[in-house]
Structure formats: C-alpha cells, structure tokens
Amino acid sequence: MSIKTALYDLLSGSTAVKALTSTRIYPMVAPDSADKPFIVYQRITAEHAHHLADPGGLVSSTFQISIYASSSLSSWNVAEAVRNLLDGYINASGTPVIQSIALQNEIDDYEAPTDASQGGVFSVKQDYGIWYEEATPTNV
C-alpha cells in the first residue's frame, strides 16, 4: 500500500473526521461540486534516504492537508479533528510502516467570493512531516 493510500485510509477511517466531512476527502484537488467542509491532501516533498549508494528504504515526506469550509469555525473543527488523529501517529505494524507523523505548520486562510452569488471559502492548511518505510528496489 502506498503512503498516499494509507493517509486516505487514516482520514476516511476516523469517526471524528468522517462525522464532519463524510467521505469528502480528495487527493490533490476537490471537484467543483464538492459540498463543504471537505479535505484535500497532497504530497509536497519526499526525501528518500540512501546508505552510501543504495536506497535505504526510509522516506521523509511532507504532506499538506487542506480543509475547506463555509465558516471559520467549521474549518477549525475539521482541522482539530485531523490534528488529533495525525499528530503523533505511529503504526509500526502497518503497510507501509509509519514511524511518525508530526504537525509542522498550520495556517488559516480566506478566499473572498468572486461574485455576489457565492460565499467566501475559509480554509486551514496543515503541513505534516511523515517518516515511513518503503520497499527498496530489487535491482540493488
């Protein structure tokens, strides 16, 4: 299983997150028709560790979890549910093995409406450092 799938499974399997967002959790971009609140997640960086010239099987990555909602309170509630789930998470027996997840940065934002027919969008963007193990290439 990829780290992206594992992250989706964590978010979508959380009772607290699901109570606020239902199944509205999307990789990279949400559909225009998505009801709020919803979550978008994406990998920002991935640094693959090596031992001398060989792959080491350990990855340090940064994922951004973005929460979009119709009110600031709603975005903060979802962000808090996500933080309570992910910050400090470890799964040494899963696939992939997740050595640690740590919240590194968090920012609130607001996008003003483009016309009078729509409301603005409140968001919270959280950056998480994730250390996990990956399979090493067999050609080594």
Image (spheres, rainbow, N blue to C red):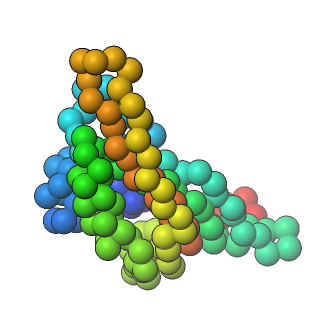
Residue for point 72% across, 69% down? 49
Residue 30 x/y as whole percent: 35, 35
Give the image quarter of residue 77.
bottom left
Q: In the image, is residue 66 above or below residue 135?
A: above
Residue for point 29% across, 50% down? 72
Q: Quadrant of the N terminus?
A: bottom left
Residue 33 x/y as whole percent: 25, 26
Residue 89 x/y as whole percent: 40, 77
Seen as rendered, the residue at the extreme left is 19
| 45 relative to 35 in the view: left or right | right
Q: Quadrant of the C terminus?
A: bottom right
Q: In the image, is residue 97 above or below residue 65?
A: below
Residue for point 32% across, 33% down? 120
| 120 relative to 132 in the view: left or right | left
Q: Tally the numbered discs.
A: 0
Seen as rendered, the residue at the extreme right is 52
Does the rendering let one see residue 80? Answer: yes
Residue for point 41% across, 74% down? 87
Residue 105 x/y as whole percent: 53, 64
Q: In the image, is residue 47 above or below residue 122?
A: below
Considering depth in this image, is 97 or 73 the residue closer to the camera? Answer: 73
Give the image quarter of residue 110.
top left
Does the rendering let one see residue 13? Answer: no
Considering depth in this image, is 87 or 118 the residue closer to the camera? Answer: 118
Considering depth in this image, is 135 or 15 the residue closer to the camera? Answer: 15
